Image (tube, coloured by chain):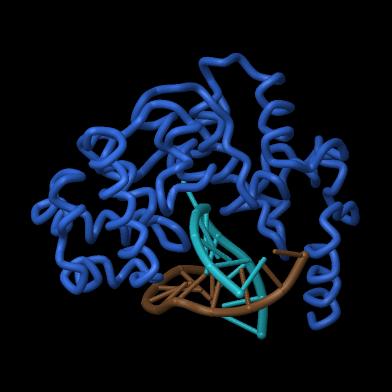
Chain colours: A blue, B cyan, C brown
Amino acid sequence: MLAGRYPDARCELTFGDPFQLLVATILSAQTTDRRVNGVTPALFARYPDARALASADRAEVETIIQPTGFFRAKTDSLLKMASALVERFDGRVPRRLQDLVTLPGVGRKTANVVLGDAFGVPGITVDTHVGRLARRLGWTGEQDPVAVEHAIGALFPRRDWTHLSHVLIFHGRRTCHARRPACGACPVATLCPSYGAGETDPDAAAALVRTEARA
DNA sequence: ATCCCGAGGG
DNA sequence: CCCTCTGGAT
């Protein structure tokens, strides 16, 4: 199984229920799971559910989540999100994508992660990494993330989607970087039309040229 | 220096 | 479509 090569390619957020995963996922933007896991125990000890977080002390939340970066924006999102949960969903995390994305601070990416990891709904998430990965692997069709999600999903059995999604994101982040993809460490390099000269991401290609020119 | 397992706002 | 928000990693 593909996963064998990627022991870390799974959700590494620690959470006890859907609400906590939702919070942890919002916190995880532009940070490592390790850092998120460092602040969530203190956060959940003070604010274990939506009702508690909805009336939280803003300054205290900022202090707790400060190490995760973007802490003012994230605190804003968290408090508004919690209020929305209380007011519109009886304090519970909705199970439908169209409901999740109406929550402040929750976009398609976060909603997908919650659906997959908290509720076990199979799905592929195409973020910036996976979009780039798809392009490099030869995808020239519709670039809209949802279209790419469907295209990838059509290639694999539904029961593998959630795990596969983590694998793809992880691979895009750790190996198929935007600027200097580590093709030597890539298990599918021989299948990849972009291997060697074949860079299909214009931005990454330009940067790659720059990087090589310097070396 | 540059980018990130984003989202909201102009 | 562009910008900003933060701190860290590489």
Q: Is residue A21 above or below residue A176?
A: above
Q: Choose top left, top right, bottom left or bottom right for residue A60.
A: bottom left
Q: Is residue A88 left or right of residue A46?
A: right
Q: Residue at x 32, y 55 (%)?
A: A80
Residue A187: image x %, image y %?
67, 39
Q: Position of residue A9 (x, y in %)?
A: 47, 40
Looking at the picture, how far across and down is residue A174, in whole percent? 57, 53
Q: Residue furthest left?
A: A45
Does A20 appear above or below C6? above
Quadrant where the C terminus of chain A lies? bottom right
Q: Identify the residue shown where x is 23% and y is 41%.
A: A86
Give the camera-side residue of C6 and A130: C6
Closer to the camera in the image, A23 or A4: A23
Q: Does residue A101 appear to the left or right of A135 in the view shown?
A: left
**Observer-nearest of A92 and A188:** A92
**Which quadrant of the figure contains the N terminus of chain A?**
top right
Q: Residue at x 23, y 60 (%)?
A: A38
- Farthest residue toward the right? A197
Badge count: 0
Name the spot of residue A96 as percent of width and height, x first: 44, 27
Left-right relation of A116 to C3: left
Is A143 placed left or right of A52 in the picture? right
Residue in the picture at 15% in, 66% down: A57
